[in-house]
Image (cartoon, rainbow, N blue to C red):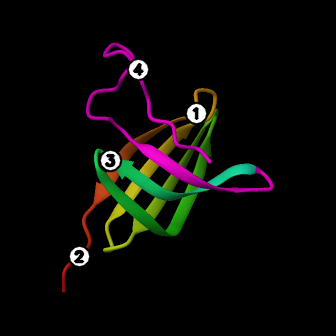
Amino acid sequence: MCRRAALLSNTERKPDVKMVQVECYAGYKGDERPVRVKMGEERLEVVEVEDRWYSPGETYFRVRVAGGDRYVLRHVEAQDVWSLEGYRKAEVE
């Protein structure tokens, strides 16, 4: 299970990037996909991985959580660090 949050110095962080803790489903390939996201004291259940894409050394996931909000999560594999790269609030009808 991956649960790591970044502990980077201020010089290593990108501005406007929020580090998060992520719990993953661990299948035959190891940590395959996020199942929970923890930001501060808030714990969000991932109900769907809508998309994923790869960059050298990184994997991005667009997920929908309970309540309908969407997040883009980035996993830096070498450091096993997760960050929040994007957010879209659920549309209210």
Q: To which quarter of the image does residue 15 belong?
A: top left
Q: Is residue 63 above or below residue 76?
A: below
Whether pointer 2 and pointer 1 mark residues with C-beta atoms closer than 8 Å, the reply is no
- Horizontal placement of 38 versus 23: left or right? left
Mark 4 highlights which residue? 8
Q: Nearer the viewer, residue 27 or 64?
A: 27
Q: Please tell me whether mark 2 sits on a helix, a strand or a loop.
A: loop
| Badge 3 amino acid | Met
Q: Residues within 10 Å of mark 4 (few under 14, many from 20)?
A: few
| Badge 1 amino acid | Asp
Mark 3 highlights which residue? 39
Q: Nearer the viewer, residue 69 or 5?
A: 5
Q: Is residue 12 above or below residue 21?
A: above
Is residue 17 inside the magenta stretch? yes
The quarter of the image holding the C terminus is bottom left
Q: Earlier in the sequence, mark 3 or mark 4?
A: 4
Q: Earlier in the sequence, mark 2 or mark 4?
A: 4
Q: Is residue 8 above or below residue 43?
A: above
- Identified at 32% across, 35% down, the residue is 17
Q: Residue furthest right?
A: 28
| Dot label at residue 91 | 2
Q: Earlier in the sequence, mark 1 or mark 3?
A: 3
| Badge 4 amino acid | Leu
Mark 1 highlights which residue? 80
The span shown in magenta is 1-29
Q: Residues within 10 Å of mark 3 (few under 14, many from 20)?
A: some
- Identified at 39% across, 67% down, the residue is 65
Q: Position of residue 67 (x, y in %)?
A: 31, 74
